[in-house]
């Protein structure tokens, strides 16, 4: 970053304290929502909802999306949403499995997949940041293109077996009832939260997302921040794809399909916006993911069609943006 | 050309402002036509039999439903409604309703009107959520699409217009050597493209998209415009659903998702500003023509369907990158 | 979040947890046998839902508890569902898993919990195999199409289209590839350059535009054969030919029988291979799960070649299929039939 100065409050239109209030406000309401979900679960299912095995189930399923959200949050915050993360995770997954199939050791295959993700992320960033392409349209294009790449790499069989006993055992490890992967994701969420709220870098990202012209006037390199944010987002999706190989012992052309909506819906419920930067907090994203995962789990345990989860998530999403608007977010007229 | 240049869109910081400063319509037309001709010439040189009636049929069939959806999407974009991401749901909802009632013996004209009405009702529903909640259309339609898909998945698995129905026969036949379902698309593009800049209500929609405060100052009701545009655009999606039912076999609730990318790409390539206020409907004929030729052409070059997805995605990325670059340069 | 909010929330939570533990923890443990069923969850394929409905009806008839989850055609969801079955302490699981590459993980988890598993159609070591030999079903369909090609075109088609569905993984390789093999058995001399594959995703709506482009790229082909993953994918190619005015140049033979019954059958779909997928639960319960419930588990047979229960493929021409009821009616008749009767016995016109 080129300078220490922050954009003056008047120019940015965003007072730092107001910004923090906004974030904590949304975190509070999402926390209340999570408590409501837990209460519903306890009343409907009984104490078993919080049993060790059920907590493990929720934790394992939400771990990878949460890790991806910890990274993708920086792109949203900087005002450049990356819709391609679902296919990005898929490509990373099949690349890892394909390289392992060629005899590469796990670590090398994983590095290869992460390198590929960063290259695709750089393409996103070049189109969006350097050329000024609309982020939604450009990364939607990347979403479709990378799904094609995943099909090509997975080959006519559609999937690649990559069962590595050690890797699988690692992804199934637990600390008490919590899967190790979940603990790692949670740690990343905490680190991301600290970066966003406590460091200069985080404030720069928020400033760029809140008002890029003001940030630029204050000497922050908008280009560098956004380019970096999109690379981070791609890297997160790449790591998620690698971890899926461990969890699933394989990769398929469909790995990660729809993940972008799963993650962004939860993040929007948690206070982020895919349309404007500068708002949102990784902690809110994590709580949003837990709300969705908890709801989904209640319906799973009751053996109710997962489509009802989708309806509830859609309604929660609309409620969350309405709440954000009532709290003083952008009104559309 | 029916291109309309109004006051500069008030795109706020953050996103690249799509097509905000495209040159007048003729420039876009020349670029599109040039790209399309180049594609045809290169494919024809590669394989002479590319220039056949079969290719023409394949391309025009592809154009039909996509083109109608693009008109609906362009109307939303020009009037400042940004994007309707729920088209996949309303398209299939309309097609499924039409198929169901044809199966039950409803006369074709009634079923067709019903299909259009279903689409319009869906659009109105979106508009109510957007206007009453004062919420951004992209997020609202993202949410309603997700909910709509889930509800349809709970209600039905498969629908199909009866193959003995006159609608199915219509969908497979030609007029003047081109598919029947292609002509309604062309007529729609021409009529909407003519009316939009030339009627009072059309100009209101453009004004609202361009600068809503200025439009409001002139006494144009934002709410009424939103309701009207989303309902009309929904009705057009409903019409696309009718054409889809006429020309597809059995289809499930998620069959509409494949249209999302080509439709958005077509609208952007046509120079419609998603920031509102700018764009020519007529240009859609060129952008849809170009984009619908790409997959056929790729098959002639021997690329698999997977590569087609890669190419389609890249075309969109390159298109919006060029669009963004032009907008950036003009801002300087 | 303020500290007060947190404290209040934690307090509420603790109270509720204690209350729930006192009331809910005292429920009487269920003694009934509990069957878990993971359906495939691909919405476009309506037999996937019917598979669960039949299993549910048969389980209820036996007085069992029945838990159905949808794999959503997603590997991560299939793993999560296995965890839920284990937590739910089901006594046996039926898996229809469209993402079979994750099966080793499912086997690891369910095996560790000592829950016996029946797998439909896709073999996995340690799972009772119930179902069809997909490759044999493919070959049977390919041979039937080959006989038509031989009689009509002297085994000299201009084009053989394969409507692939790579999302179905190995099942696609078996079925679509099997159909090609069966066709080659009857017509061994079709040149390699006549075979063209395209991705149809097992859905007519996806296969149609893809096949349209492929047909346009072969404008001179007058004798066209179509094979594919299922009826939907094959049908898409046929409809593409119809749109291009080449309806009488194309003959297709499908798999799974989805679109060969009822009053909407395309005249150019010459036949299909039924497995009566919706009625698989009859086999699974009769030959495996009833015995497990009786405390008498059958010997493990996890190989498609030597299955725990074999479903016979039933190739039928369009004319024969006209006498077979559509799926909802078949389910009704199946559930009305004496226990253990299969749909093959009820509906297949020429039994092996």
Image: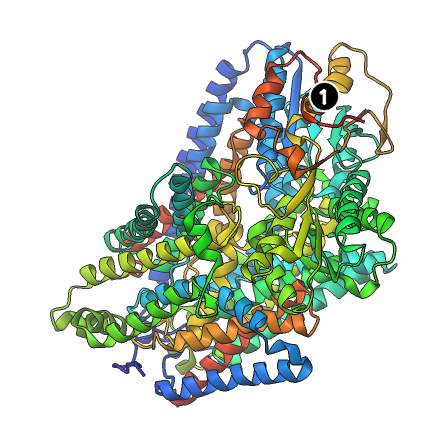
Find disc 1 in the rendering and name its residue.
C345
Quadrant of res B69: bottom left
Seen at 44% across and 49% down, the residue is B92
User: A68 or C246, which lies in front?
Assistant: C246
Seen at 66% across and 55% down, the residue is C250
Q: Is residue C69 left or right of residue A174?
A: left
How far from the left and from the top, in percent, is residue B33? 47, 84
Regarding residue B323, the answer to whether it shows in the image is yes
Q: Is residue B42 above or below residue B108?
A: below
Quadrant where the C terminus of chain B is found in the figure: bottom left
Q: Is residue A134 left or right of residue B190?
A: right
How far from the left and from the top, in percent, is residue C285? 71, 19
Seen at 36% across and 68% down, the residue is B74
User: C174 or B15, which lies in front?
Assistant: C174
Count numbered badges in the picture: 1
Q: Is residue B166 left or right of residue C124?
A: left
How far from the left and from the top, in percent, is residue C56? 59, 21
Q: Is residue C340 above or below residue C183?
A: above
Quadrant of res B9: bottom left
Regarding residue B136, the answer to whether it shows in the image is no
Which chain contains the residue that carries disc 1?
A: C
User: A64 or C285, which lies in front?
Assistant: C285
Colouring style? rainbow
Q: Is residue C241 above or below residue B51?
A: above
- In the orientation shown, which residue stands out farthest toward the left? B219
Q: Secondary structure at mark 1?
A: helix
Q: Residues within 10 Å of mark 1 (few under 14, many from 20)?
A: few
Quadrant where the N terminus of chain B is found in the figure: bottom left
How far from the left and from the top, in percent, is residue C112? 78, 29
User: B231 or C19, which lies in front?
Assistant: B231
């Amino acid at each position: 970053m080129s300078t220490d100065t922050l954009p003056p409050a008047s120019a940015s239109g965003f007072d730092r304290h107001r910004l923090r209030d906004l974030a904590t406000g949304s975190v509070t309401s999402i926390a209340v929502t999570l408590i409501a979900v837990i209460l519903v679960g306890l009343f409907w299912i009984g104490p078993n909802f919080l049993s060790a095995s059920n907590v493990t189930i929720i934790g394992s399923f939400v771990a990878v999306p949460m890790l991806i959200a910890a990274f993708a949050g920086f792109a949203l915050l900087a005002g450049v949403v990356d819709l391609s993360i679902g296919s990005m995770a898929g490509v990373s997954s099949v690349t890892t499995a394909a390289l392992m199939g060629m005899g590469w050791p796990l670590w090398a295959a994983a590095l290869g997949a992460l390198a590929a993700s960063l290259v695709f992320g750089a393409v996103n960033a070049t189109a969006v940041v350097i050329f000024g392409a609309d982020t939604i349209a450009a990364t939607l294009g990347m979403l479709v293109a990378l799904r094609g790449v995943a099909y090509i790499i997975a080959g006519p069989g559609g999937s690649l077996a990559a069962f590595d006993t050690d890797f699988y055992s690692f992804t199934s490890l637990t600390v008490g009832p919590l899967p190790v992967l979940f603990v790692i994701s949670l740690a990343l969420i905490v680190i991301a939260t600290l970066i966003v709220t406590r460091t200069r870098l985080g404030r720069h990202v928020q400033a760029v997302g809140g008002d890029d012209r003001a940030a630029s006037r204050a000497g922050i390199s908008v280009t560098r921040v956004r380019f970096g944010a999109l690379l981070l987002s791609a890297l997160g999706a790449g790591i998620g794809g690698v971890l899926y190989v461990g969890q699933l012992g394989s990769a398929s052309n469909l790995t990660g399909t729809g993940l972008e909506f799963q993650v962004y819906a939860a993040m929007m419920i948690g206070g982020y916006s895919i349309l404007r930067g500068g708002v949102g907090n990784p902690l809110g994203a994590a709580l949003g993911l837990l709300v969705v995962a908890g709801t989904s789990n209640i319906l799973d345990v009751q053996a109710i069609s997962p489509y009802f989860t989708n309806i509830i998530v859609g309604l929660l999403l609309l409620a969350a943006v309405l709440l954000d608007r009532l709290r003083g977010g952008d009104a559309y007229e | 050309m029916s291109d309309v240049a109004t006051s500069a869109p008030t795109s706020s910081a953050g996103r690249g402002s799509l097509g905000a400063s495209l040159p007048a319509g003729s420039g876009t037309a020349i670029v599109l036509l040039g790209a399309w001709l180049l594609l045809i010439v290169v494919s024809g040189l590669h394989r002479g039999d590319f220039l056949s009636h079969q290719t023409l049929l394949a391309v025009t069939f592809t154009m039909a439903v996509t083109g109608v959806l693009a008109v609906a999407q362009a109307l939303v974009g020009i009037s400042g409604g940004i994007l309707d991401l729920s088209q996949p749901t309303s398209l299939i909802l309309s097609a499924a309703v039409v198929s169901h009632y044809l199966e039950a013996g409803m006369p074709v004209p009634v079923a067709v009107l019903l299909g259009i009405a279903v689409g319009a009702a869906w659009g109105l529903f979106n508009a109510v959520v957007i206007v009453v909640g004062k919420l951004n259309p992209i997020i609202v339609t993202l949410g309603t699409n997700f909910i709509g898909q889930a509800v349809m998945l709970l209600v039905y698995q498969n629908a199909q217009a009866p193959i003995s129905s006159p609608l199915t026969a219509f969908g497979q036949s030609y007029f003047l050597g081109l598919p029947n379902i292609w002509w309604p698309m062309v007529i729609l593009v021409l009529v909407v493209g003519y009316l939009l800049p030339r009627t009072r209500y059309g100009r209101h929609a453009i004004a609202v998209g361009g600068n809503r405060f200025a439009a409001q100052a002139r006494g144009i009701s934002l709410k009424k415009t939103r309701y009207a545009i989303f309902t009309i655009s929904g009705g057009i999606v409903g019409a696309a659903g009718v054409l889809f039912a006429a020309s597809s076999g059995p289809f499930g609730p998620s069959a509409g998702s494949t249209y999302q990318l080509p439709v958005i790409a077509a609208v952007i390539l046509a120079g419609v500003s998603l920031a509102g206020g700018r764009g020519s409907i007529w240009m859609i004929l060129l952008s849809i023509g170009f984009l619908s030729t790409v997959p056929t052409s790729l098959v002639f070059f021997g690329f698999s369907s997977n590569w087609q997805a890669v190419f389609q995605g890249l075309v969109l990325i390159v298109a919006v990158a060029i669009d963004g670059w032009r907008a950036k340069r003009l801002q300087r | 979040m303020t500290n007060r909010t947190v404290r209040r929330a934690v307090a509420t939570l603790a109270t509720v947890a204690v209350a729930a533990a006192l009331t809910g923890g005292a429920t009487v443990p269920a003694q009934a046998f509990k069957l878990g069923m993971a359906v495939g969850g691909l919405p476009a394929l309506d037999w996937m839902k019917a598979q669960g409905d039949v299993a549910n009806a048969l389980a209820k008839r036996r007085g069992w508890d029945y838990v159905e989850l949808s794999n959503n055609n997603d590997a991560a969801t299939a793993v999560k569902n296995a965890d839920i079955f284990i937590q739910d302490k089901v006594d046996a699981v039926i898996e229809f898993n469209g993402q079979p590459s994750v099966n080793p993980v499912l086997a690891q988890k369910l095996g560790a919990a000592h829950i016996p598993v029946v797998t439909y159609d896709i073999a996995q070591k340690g799972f009772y195999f119930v179902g069809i030999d997909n490759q044999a079903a493919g070959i049977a369909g390919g041979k039937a199409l080959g006989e038509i090609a031989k009689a009509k075109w002297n085994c000299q088609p201009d084009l053989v289209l394969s409507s692939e569905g790579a999302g179905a993984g190995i099942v696609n390789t078996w079925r679509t590839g099997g159909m090609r093999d069966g066709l080659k058995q009857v017509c061994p001399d079709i040149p390699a350059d006549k075979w063209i594959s395209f991705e149809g995703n097992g859905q007519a709506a996806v296969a149609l535009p893809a096949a349209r482009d492929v047909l346009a790229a072969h404008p001179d082909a007058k004798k066209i054969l179509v094979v594919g993953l299922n009826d939907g994918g094959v049908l898409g190619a046929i409809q593409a030919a119809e749109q291009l005015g080449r309806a009488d140049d194309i003959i297709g033979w499908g798999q799974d029988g989805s679109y060969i019954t009822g009053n909407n059958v395309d005249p150019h779909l010459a036949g299909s291979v039924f497995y009566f997928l919706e009625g698989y639960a009859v086999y699974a319960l009769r030959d495996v799960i009833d015995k497990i419930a009786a405390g008498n588990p059958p010997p493990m047979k996890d190989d498609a070649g030597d299955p725990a229960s074999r479903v016979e493929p039933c190739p039928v021409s369009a004319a024969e299929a006209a006498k077979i009821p559509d799926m909802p009616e078949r389910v009704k008749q199946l559930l009305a039939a004496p226990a253990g009767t299969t749909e093959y016995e009820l509906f297949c016109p020429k039994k092996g």
